[in-house]
Amino acid sequence: MTVTVRFAPSPTGRIHIGNARTALFNWLFAMNNKGRFIQRFDDTDIARSKQEYADSILYDLHWLGIFPDVTEYQSRRFEIYDAAVERLKAARVLYACYETPEELDLRRKVRRTRGLPPVYGREALTLTPEQVAEYQSDGRKPHWRFLLPNFTSDPLQPERTDVLWNDLVRGEETVDLASLSDPILVREDGTYLYTLPSVVDDIEMGVSHVIRGDDHVTNTGVQIAIFKALGAEPPVFGHHNLLTTTTGEGLSKRTGALSIESLREDGIEPMAVASLAVLVGTSENVTAAHDLNELAGHFDPAATSKSASKFDPDELLVLNRALMHQMSFEEARDRLMVLGISGDKAEPFWLAVRGNLDRLSDAVAWWRILNEGPQEPAEFSGEDRDFLHQAFELLPEEPWNGTVWKDWTGKIREATGRKGKPLFMPLRLALTGRTSGPELSDLLPLMGREGTLARRP
């Protein structure tokens, strides 16, 4: 069997880190099984779905390193769903209902007062032709519900209403359909809710594995019943835990919380996002993978916790730093050029500063310091100013090499008696304007003697 997965968001907003988790779970599963990845936009909600959101989702996926084998839009497939509806009607498992929302709400309240679950009582199944005609003459249009089945095949056994499956993430899973209302598949205006098009597309597109958030567990029980009603074998399902904010709030495309776009604009590397999105809430250590191939080696859907996981953006910076510290000049070159960092100094500069960066864009400030001097010159005491005047008089002549810093500070130590922090800190402040940063032994040869002398207080 060829593994085929799909990522199927509705294009109603920018995707966030939780959506990316689902996309990456599917992508890595396909990678590990040499399978196919379908990007499907569940855009049957015509009023809220926008092409600009679909385009931004594709851009975000490409940024993360996900390149779908095919892209599909449900809004272009209504004829296929219409045909499925007719099949379900012919099988007498899709039935017309005429209740208004107010009538349904009243019935739920009545059931609660009787100690019954507030599910739909299937009253529409007992409507007479005369009642239907009366509703229609009043201008009511029906919505259509799917008749949830009983799964008893042995007439000697009691009815069984639970759906069982072996979940790729959660293991043995069950949903009792008796606790659910028959789901509405088609609205009064003929538009579709999520449930039916999703099943039809999974069948038509040959989806073998459906990996999604565990907020779909109950929905999966319903969809398995629809698969069977359409004569299809259900795919393998896997439901991963959801991500929340550090305060425990859910993520939403509408609010833009932790959107991929905002993380990208904040200078976070795609592999920092991917590594944390995939590994948080699993038994794996959360470390920064160099690429998706490496991350795939750490990916095991069954290692995912069943409880929700809090996503801490501060952890992204930790992973981002790790990626910066490991990034080769070849990987950074083109991006540095865009930032104005190029020429013969670019490579030794990058190797000198990368260990002090949170984000690649932070290199710009150090490039300016290297070429222009401290952006905010430090204030020195009279004693330190005298020390620096003496120190700069001892600056070695050119040519300079990698030992110039050691040679220079050795002379200063011998002449002034200073050592340790009292020696190094005034020099660092004079040369960079900062109390910490890259090794001065790496920066000094790039500054050159003339550039270094220009920083004398």
Image (tube, rainbow, N blue to C red):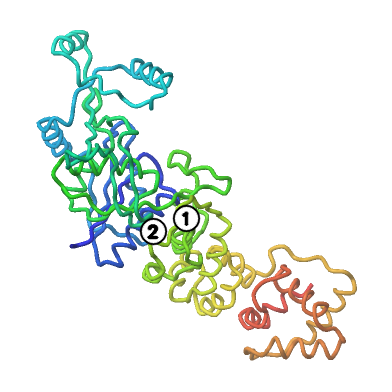
Question: Is tag 2's residue or tag 1's residue first in the polypeptide sequence?
Answer: 2
Between 17 and 336, the residue placed more toward the observer is 17
Distance, label 2 to label 1, CA atoms, is 9 Å
Query: Of residues 390 and 189, which is closer to you in this image?
Result: 189
Residue 15 lies, with reference to residue 349, above or below; the image says above
Residue at 27 percent of width and 66 percent of height: 33
In this rendering, the answer to whether 360 lies above or below 388 is above
User: What residue is shown at x 22% (from left), y 55% (from top)?
Assistant: 208
Q: Nearer the viewer, residue 301 or 255?
A: 301
* SS type, badge 1: helix
- Side of 411 where 270 appears, left or right: left
For label 2, the crowd category at 10 Å Cα-Cα, with few meaning under 14, some 14 to 19 and many 20 or more, is some
Which amino acid, by three-letter code, is at mark 1? Arg
> Height in image: 194 above or below 315?
above
Q: Quadrant of the C terminus?
A: bottom right
**Can you identify the residue that label 1 sits on?**
264
Residue at 62 percent across and 90 percent down: it is: 401
Horizontal arrangement in the rendering, residue 227 relative to residue 258 (left or right): left
Type of amino acid under label 2: Trp
Q: Which residue is mark 2?
A: 63
Percent of width and height locating residue 400: 64, 89
Name the outermost residue toward the right: 383
